[in-house]
Amino acid sequence: MTSTKQWPGQVEQAELASIAQQIREDIVDMVYNAKSGHPGGSLSAADIMTALYFKEMRIDPAKPDWAERDRFVLSKGHAAPVQYSALARKGYFDPAFLPTLRQIHSPLQGHPHYGSVPGIEASTGSLGQGGGIAVGMALAAKLDGKDYKVFTLWGDGEIEEGLVWESAMAAAHYKLDNLIGFVDWNGLQIDGKITDVMNPEPIDAKFAAFGWHVETVDGHDVAAICAAIEKAKAVKGQPSLILCKTVKGKGVSFMEGDGGWHGKAPDEDQWKQAIQELGGEPAPISADEMKALVEKAKAALAGDEAHAAKAAPGKAAPDQTSYVIYAKDGKPEQGPATRESYGKTLAELSATHPNLVVMDADLSKSTMTANFKDAAADRFFNAGIAEANMACMAGGLAASGKTVYISTFAMFAAGRAYEQILNTVASSGFDVKVAASHAGLTVGEDGMSHQMLSDIALMRTIPGLQVYVPADAAETTAMIRYITDSPGPAYIRLGRAKSPILFDDAIDNAAYDPTQIRTLREGGDVTLAACGIMAGIALEAADLLAAEGVQAKVLNISCIKPLDMETLLAAAKETGAIVTCEEHSVIGGMGAAITEALSGTYPVPVLRLGVNDQFGQSGTPNDLLKLYGLDKEHIAALAKDAIALKA
């Protein structure tokens, strides 16, 4: 690197070309030092980024979280070098740190990561997701009456992703005239020409057909790009797309028009040649110098506190009262489904939580989010049958200060939107709650395609994502209130079928804490650890066992991640044997979580009751529970087997 010059203030049009040239030099230098990365598509986008960061966007590097700032989302996240360079040269951080790209411990990760570097608005890199995030940010601006603009940049190969078109449809549907997208149209992707791999053209006509205003420009003419942006800012009632005709590898003679430079670093001779062609002077960095640079970058950028995960507000000491009213008249009473209580509670919270936003994917009358829509229609957004885009939109809304609930059936939430929950929501610690209804076998007659039996397994592998399963309607109300006031991502598993009444409504109080295991029944011979609808069935099994002289402790595991290890360990030590009960696969679910937790702390026999590596099928909920052995008789039998295994 030959210069650490920055341009934090107003820039004259005549300076933009030299800034773009500096950005290209930075790109080559970063990728060379990293020995990996994506130079081709970063170089092709340099003029677009120059126009945005140094002329068109309303931003202040001294105040990266300024509420009135324009937002930019790099959907083609592999082009991170061009964004890092633009941010550094604008003044968000010292350009001297740029060569640390992709180094171990460097804040400059291989793809943009929210919270690592000031000015990064969202984690991207998994192609197709940036558009939905940008849509969410633009919706938030409309909700808040703000006049900021949201910009996003797609690659032309990236638009082969169906998720791009889900976000394009949503942007037009909601008339987001504060959203301006770009396509870097360089014509090449990893496996060849875009027209040979999977032809997305005519790109302009397709976006126009989706309801976008479209401008086509020379993507290397900064003045033309700025003029197109100004025209787009004046458009009313629809989003705008600026289609930028570019050259992959622009500015480096041997990279231009060569798709092989999509994801390849230059060797030393190529690096020297490229830097000299761009007007710089190669400056090698030794291993010791690089290590020192990384340490300086870590220290300088560690203070990005605005994006750090926020702790939950202080709460009263956990309420240890049981509130159990199960079988108060000698037999279990059926109450509302947990999804019903969820919808009712959201509607109540709408009045006290003005930043609460709810989204659904064309299932609001089934998930019961229609209740919230009736109470606060302006803060309810239907994503249509587009669950993955719904998760991305929620990320954009949350990045703009909203607490967002997204709802659909568990099969589509945990299954179809898994990767968006992982990459867009959880990796950024966004305040998005995934409330997935119709989980498990008790979906009933809809059959296998809708019976999600692996969602707990999937969701609990996602770092930072908490996983909850309420046992009945009363607990659902208390749980939703708690989760709403607890910042950060969460997954809540809800049922379609009516569930036994276990708790008095008084469980809904300020001291309720679902992360604490609640003891439903005391006993010293064996522990029955259950979640969801199985908690009531475990109590029935305890009655059977009591008739045979076996005293079973029954635990309600309402939070599977994180597990309440203190209560779990105490139960393991007291009873010496555990049976886990869940309406979920035995592979990876609650039973697996408990087994993993105890194996390294206090190993005792743990037998798991659940669905044994099978698909579901159609039938009534009760018939299915019986068919798959999720009933009191099987629980009682396993309990006796577990007792027999005690040392």
Image: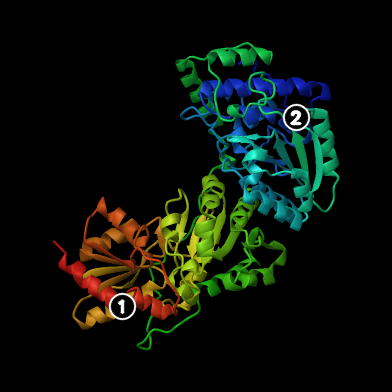
Residue at image mark 2: 54
Q: How many marks?
A: 2
- Residue at the spot 33% in from the left edge and 65% down from the top edge: 612
Q: Secondary structure at mark 2?
A: helix
Q: Residues within 10 Å of mark 1 (few under 14, many from 20)?
A: many
Q: Which residue is mark 1?
A: 632
The answer to whether residue 95 is seen in the rendering is no
Judge whether 480 appears above or below 427 on screen. Answer: below
Circle 2: is it few (<14), some (14-19), or many (20+) Cα within 10 Å? many
Q: Is residue 392 left or right of residue 616?
A: right
Q: Camera-side residue: 360 or 620?
A: 620
- Nearer-the-camera pick, 391 or 165: 165
Q: Residue 208: where, in percent of width, then height?
A: 79, 49
Residue 146 percent coordinates (x, y): 76, 49
The percent coordinates of residue 180 (x first, y second) are 76, 44
Q: For this view, does 131 lie left or right of residue 305?
A: right
| Precedes in sequence: disc 1 or disc 2 | 2
Amino acid under disc 2 = Phe
Q: In the drawing, does residue 517 fall left or right of residue 115?
A: left
**Above or below 295: residue 384:** below
Counting from the top left corner in percent of width and height, residue 399 is at 63, 48
Q: Amino acid at mark 1?
A: Lys
Q: CA separation, marks 1 and 2? A: 67 Å
**Front one among 405 and 362:** 362
Instruction: Decide if residue 621 is in sight here.
Output: yes
Work out which quarter of the rendered image holds the C terminus and state it. Answer: bottom left
Instruction: Give above or below for 610 relative to 166.
Output: below
Q: Identify which residue, 503 or 272, lies in the foreground.
A: 272
